Image (tube, rainbow, N blue to C red):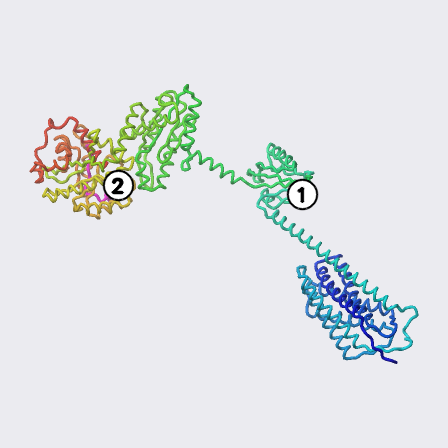
Amino acid sequence: METVQGTYNIGLVIVSCMISILASYSALNLAGRIHLASGRLRVFWLAGGAVSMGIGIWSMHFVGMLALQLPMQMTYNIPLVILSMVVPIFVSFIALWTVTQKKLTWRALLIGGLLLASGVIDMHYTGMAAMAMKISYNPWLVTLSVVIAITASMAALALMRELRQEGSRTLYKWASAILMGAAIAGMHYTGMAAASFHVHEHHDGMIGGSEVDMNSLALIIALSSLLLISFTIYGAFINGRLNQKDKMIRQQEKWYRALYENNVDGILSINTEGRIIDMNPAILNMTESIREDFVGKPVTALHRFFEPEIYRAAREQHEESFSLNSRAYETQIVHPNGEHIHLSVISVPISVDGEATGTHIIVRDITQQKKTRAKVEHLAYHDELTSLPNRRQFNTLVEDRIEQARGAKRMAVMVLDIDRFKMINDSLGHAYGDAFLQKVGQRICEVIDPEKVTLSRMGGDEFALICHSFASDDEVARLAQRIVSVIQVPYTLKDNDFYVTASIGVAMYPEHGEDREELIKNADSAMYEVKRGGKNGYRFYSPELDEELLFKIEIEADLRKAIERGELEVYYQPQYRMPDRQLIGIEALLRWKHPVRGMIPPDRFIPIAEETGIIMEIGRWVLREACLQTKIWHDAGQTKVPVSVNLSTQQFHQPDLEFEIERILVETGLDPQYLELEITESMMMDAALSIAIMNRLKRLGIRLSLDDFGTGYSSLSYLSMLPISRLKIDRSFVMRLEESGNERAIVTTIIAMAYSLGMDVIAEGIETEGQLEILTEQRCLEFQGYYFSRPVPPGDLFAGDADLSLGMTAEPPTASSADADSSNANAIDEAAGRGA
């Protein structure tokens, strides 16, 4: 038996390596396809992949065998060739099934690798056995081929496992395919190198007619394998593209479903047949329904949520949405609990190739938005605090009433202002001020007929009324008086009773104005005239009030410049103690000498100063002038007596009052014990706050007195806690002492109470000797008034009067020497003192 040496056809060797690489790449792709597939598609790809991979491995092997050229004609045993082809298909199935499992353990990987290696080895040596010649093997090289087969199989399974994901990069797959292909080819050609071929004449296993020509077989196998592998790779590529497309579709579907299911707006999908095909959770929650009650049913199933008329209108809007144009509208439904829900609806048509296929109805609950909008609209025309019509609506109502009347029907406009409201607001704070205004509005509403009268709040403490139905002016007057009366009733705030009054001005249409602006202006003028006349009342407009308004405007402008122009002066009125007529003090009183109008009475300009806030600047000026003048008198050797200065309400409640007074005392050099501040009961709306302010002033060393006692709204419960040194009996009681026993009883009580509380008491406005005698009998020993002295300029107080400079006075003037209008002048002086 002769041993022969063969040579290799390099072209076929290259083809076999290409087949090996392509088969490996195909296996890597198929692993991914099989991993993603399920059901019948998984079985199809698993079987097809096993055939493709097995045929690829077998083809590489057989083409490699055909690449060997021996010096004789080679033939093969067909049954063994077929057997060598079936084995790799079977083990490829096992390998692919192994690596595409969800969980792959090292044990399963080892078993699968050994099975694949055994199949490859069996395929190789079965194929070698199909050659029609005697072959002997080098055991070492055979062992090496087995090791290579096992190693290549394990590596192939591991790579298929790692690269089976859909997102694996193609470059990695080709690199892995080359590595796998080289390993498979290395195993084959190592096995071929282990074989030695021996020539013999005949082989017992040969079957006649079963031998095939080598060249024809190589061509068939190479082309078939390449075609099969190419088809497999192309199929995997197409399938991958389809999978990617399906994945994109599924992803888009998830995006759509997420938007649909989680949208805060309700979405209802209806087809062209009028059937509900879907509803999202938002609309189900909105109606407290379940999907099964509506999906697949006609859209008419929704009518249960609508009132009949509203349902018909909504149905018409929905039907028009099929015109391929979106429609937006509002409607409302009735919740199962009976509550009405307002909805904003958008009907969005759905079309495919220009043909309508359905509609998405998107609904949003705008109930709260509607309520908010209604609230905003209400606030635009109503006062937020009292819910009464505001200035804007009042103006509109007046204009509408004038338009309706057209001069043939009369109408009354009232403007109402709360007197002394600022004291409540400043002393108690805005919260109590708001509560007070609400009570005022409620009280006025109680005394008016809403069918005839409309009440509005114009802002602050100002209200306005429209009387559009009345029989006579007397009826309007009676209404105004009822309002004045009801507002006078005490208000309980912060556990205390507070008293306020109202000033009302009335203008009649068409007598007092034919348009809104003129009517309101004239009613304002009448109201301000009430305030100037003492407040707490009403007045109809008259043309003479225009002159007063003009005067007020001019006075306000001049008053702002009066200090810098040196037009203001401080007069002084002495105070005495009986029976020895000892000088005990001096009161500072304000005067204004206008360059054009002459001497303007304080009661004419001080209310304007208080209303405009100028009183703060004037009050500081008066205080500084009084302290400075008193210091000059003291330095000149005159009797050292305190000067009394009246504080305005605004001054009393300013935050830094004590620091300002202390600064003035330091600047002027006046000893604090020679300054007395006079306050009124009206300043003490809040007893606790007032006491705190007065205590801070007392600590400076100055004296405090309570002016006009008995005319305000005193609370005797806190009078004993006030750090005051002296009570001042108001002139309104003094002037009637000789005529009224009641006034005498009141004065007696005030004097006794003052002494019991350890306070001094002084009576002001003394004009007659009879008044002096009555008060002296009641143990009141301190006095001030025209009976003793008029207020005089600072240069006239001590000039030429030795008795006054020594603390004594000259004989009092006789009644005949007093001016006939001394009472009025005295009242004016008091107004000057209170304002300053």
Relative to residue 765, is residue 656 depicted above or below? Answer: below
How packed is label 1: few (under 14 Cα within 10 Å), some, or many (20 or more)? some
Please indicate, yes or no, whether residue 742 appears anywhere in the rendered image: no
Query: Disc 2 marks which amino acid?
Result: Gln
x then y, percent, for residue 562: 23, 35
Quadrant showing the N terminus: bottom right
Q: Nearer the viewer, residue 607 or 159?
A: 159
Which residue appears at 22% of the width and 47% of the height? 663
Determine which residue is flagged by label 1: 277
Quadrant showing the C terminus: top left
Q: Which callout, 1 or 2, points at the residue further toward the start of the chain? A: 1
Please indicate, yes or no, whether residue 154 appears anywhere in the rendered image: yes
Determine which residue is flagged by label 2: 651
Q: Nearer the viewer, residue 821 or 572?
A: 572
Q: Secondary structure at mark 1?
A: strand
| Mark pair 1, 2: CA separation | 77 Å
What number is the disc on residue 129? none
x then y, percent, for residue 102: 69, 63
Query: Disc 1 marks which amino acid?
Result: Ile
Please provide the residue range marked out in magenta.
719-733
